[in-house]
């Protein structure tokens, strides 16, 4: 018996933003889907507009699995995770052990396919793609803040401001992020009728 996929299916039980009041709860499955879609989009933009040759399908997969270790570790709130170097490094070590644990739940003949999703390669385009997945992760968090704000929830005001600052820094390093912010982000928070042009 190999429980890898049964464990992955449990992402829906891991709630995010646990220290904050949510208008609509967000679980790890919701978040991972958003990150996968945005990471794919950023990679396509990188390829089409900025001359990269990123595997955009792999970017989607990396986005889909990027927080899978939290099935074992739980979601560590950002203020705690990044409180200091010692805590950040210790948590990174725990995450790495959780990934190894997950990978051990796959038959050995299939494992290398999944290791390529979870583990960085030395190839420059793979490294760049993984940076874009991190950008997609932040973008997803920012979109959550927009949605909460539109619901009249002021609880996310500070998170929105700090995430916006990080996104601005990312825009300077990754032009794909700037394109997404300018061309796609304004649609988030609109009503269905507005999105469909009714």
Image (cartoon, grey):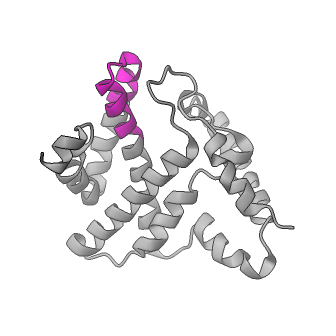
- Residue 128 makes an appearance in the image: yes
Residue 89 among those drawn in magenta: no
x and y percentages locating residue 161 in the rendered image: 32, 27
**Residue positioned most to the left:** 198
x and y percentages locating residue 120 in the rendered image: 57, 67
x and y percentages locating residue 151 in the rendered image: 33, 24
Quarter of the picture containing the N terminus is: bottom right
Q: In this picture, which residue range is highlighted in magenta?
A: 141-161
**Residue positioned most to the front:** 198
Residue 149 among those drawn in magenta: yes
SS assignment for the magenta stretch, majority: helix
Q: Is residue 115 above or below residue 166?
A: below
Q: Quadrant of residue 23?
A: top left
Query: How many marks overall?
Result: 0
Q: Residue at x 37, y 56 (%)?
A: 38
**Residue positioned most to the bottom:** 109
Seen in the image, is 21 located left or right of residue 40? right
For this rendering, which residue is in front, 86 or 157?
Answer: 157
Q: Residue at x 63, y 37 (%)?
A: 75
Q: Residue at x 51, y 21 (%)?
A: 20
Seen in the image, is 30 located left or right of residue 72? left
Q: Quadrant of residue 155?
A: top left
- Residue 186 makes an appearance in the image: no
Q: Is residue 113 above or below residue 151?
A: below
**Residue positioned most to the right:** 1
Quarter of the picture containing the C terminus is: top left
x and y percentages locating residue 125 in the rendered image: 42, 73
For this rendering, which residue is in front, 93 or 21?
Answer: 21
Seen in the image, is 165 located left or right of residue 112? left
Q: Residue at x 66, y 71 (%)?
A: 115
């Amino acid at each position: 018996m190999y429980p890898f996929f049964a464990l992955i299916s449990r992402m829906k039980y891991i709630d995010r933003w646990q220290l904050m009041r949510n208008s609509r709860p967000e679980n790890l499955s919701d978040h991972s889907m958003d990150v996968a879609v945005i990471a794919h989009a950023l990679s396509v933009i990188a390829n089409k507009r900025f001359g990269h040759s990123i595997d955009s399908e792999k970017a989607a997969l990396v986005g889909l699995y990027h927080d899978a270790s939290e099935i074992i570790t739980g979601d560590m709130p950002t203020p705690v995770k990044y409180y200091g170097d010692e805590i950040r490094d210790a948590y990174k070590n725990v995450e790495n052990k959780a990934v190894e644990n997950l990978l051990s739940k796959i038959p050995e003949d299939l494992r290398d396919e999944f290791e390529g999703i979870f583990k960085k390669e030395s190839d420059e385009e793979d490294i760049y793609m993984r940076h874009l997945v991190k950008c997609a992760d932040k973008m997803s968090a920012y979109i959550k803040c927009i949605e909460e704000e539109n619901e009249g929830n002021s609880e996310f005001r500070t998170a929105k401001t700090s995430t916006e600052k990080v996104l601005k820094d990312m825009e300077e390093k990754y032009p794909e992020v700037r394109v997404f912010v300018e061309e796609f982000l304004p649609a988030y928070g609109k009503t269905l009728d507005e999105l469909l042009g009714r």
